[in-house]
Image (cartoon, rainbow, N blue to C red):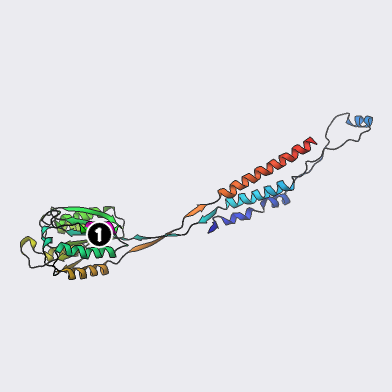
Amino acid sequence: MYVLELPWLLLLLPLPWLLRYVLPARHCRQDAVRTPFFQQMAEATGQRPGRTATQRPVGFLAHLLNGLAWCLLVLALAAPTRLEPPIEKLQPQRDLLLAIDTSQSMETTDTGAGLSRMQAVQQVMDTFIERRRNDRLGLVIFGDRPYTQAGFTQDQSTLRTLLGELQPGIAGPRTALGDAIGLGVKQFASSAAQDKALILLSDGRDTASRMPPEQAALIARQHGIRLYCIGFGSTEGEGENRLDEALLQRIAHDSGGRYLHASDQQELALAIDELDRLLPVMQRHLQHQPASPLYVYPLGTALGLLLLGWLANWHGVRTRAGA
């Protein structure tokens, strides 16, 4: 589509003709030669004194070229523009960070489907990632220490691949819940999203953190990050392998989030469905329409016509001079 950015400038089109009408050109005639004895010379030679010829008006061709050039100059000033088809984009307004427990206890096969806890988490989370196509997602794992697997991205394919490569004990056999939250807060430092949520999944209790989980949760809240904690596994374990539901509930509550529990793969899928309900996709519809300026074409043509008009006028003057 073609538009004029400054269409009101087209009002300048009749300006030269208006000026010619209001301020017409002055025509004057005068003696070609002034001498004290000019009249006597004319009488002696029997010649009648002549007058200088006024300059002949500019020819029709020159008038036409100049008029067209003016119209094109005004058109160039009006900024003709070609509008390209609009480009639409959905901009995510929520960043989600997945923090997955990879401690040694995640190899336990008590999910009810013959799968280890890690395998069940991978299957359910893979589906969750696929459903969140319009969110930016990140991935952190934690055992003895937390590690960033992927920063915030919309590349679900890469994220799902990284998730599928996780193994129990890959980050150490113990569980550093507080440090995982702290690393998550750092990941959100560069996020400009309106809503920030950290989904923390663990099957045990904090056994290796340098930062207490409660303190990390308060820091997360100060940065506008809500914790959604999922306790996965049995609450009847012993020692370090026993799920600390009370801790997960506290840190979720302290950050303004929510705690969910799942004892097997089916319940984990239901918990993830609940997260989908609690955290609906947030996105902003953006539209941009590229524009290509076209003023150079009428401007270049106008300059060419002015040059042709000048050449035509110059040729006429030389022809009259030769005559």
Q: Position of residue 239 (x, y in %)?
A: 5, 62
**Would residue 122 appear left or right of 320 to someone viewing this image?**
left
Q: Determine which quarter of the picture holds residue 8.
A: bottom right
Q: Nearer the viewer, residue 92 or 248?
A: 92
Q: Which residues are magenta?
A: 156-162
Residue 32 vertical position relative to residue 132 in the rendered view, above or below: above
Secondary structure, magenta segment, majority class: helix
Say which residue appears at 78% left-offset and 35% top-offset.
Answer: 322
Q: Is residue 256 visible?
A: no
Mark 1 residue element: helix
How dense is the environment of label 1, judged by Cα within 10 Å: few (below 14), some, or many (20 and up)?
some
Q: Position of residue 112 (x, y in %)?
A: 13, 70
Q: Is residue 160 magenta?
A: yes
Q: Is residue 170 magenta?
A: no
Residue 4 vertical position relative to residue 276 in the rendered view, above or below: above
**Would residue 39 appear left or right of 263 to someone viewing this image?**
right
Q: Could you tell me how many numbered marks the image carries?
A: 1
**Would residue 144 appear left or right of 88 to someone viewing this image?**
left
Q: Determine which quarter of the picture holds residue 317.
A: top right
Q: Nearer the viewer, residue 36 or 115?
A: 115
Q: Position of residue 74 (x, y in %)?
A: 61, 51
Q: Nearer the viewer, residue 154 or 16?
A: 154
List the residue tagged with mark 1.
160
Q: Determine which quarter of the picture holds residue 36.
A: top right
Say which residue appears at 26% left-offset and 69% top-offset.
Answer: 277
Extreme residue toward the front, this view:
114
Q: Nearer the viewer, residue 137 or 264?
A: 264
Q: Is residue 298 visible?
A: yes
Say which residue appears at 16% left-offset and 62% top-offset.
Answer: 118
Query: Could you tell me the amino acid type at mark 1?
Result: Arg
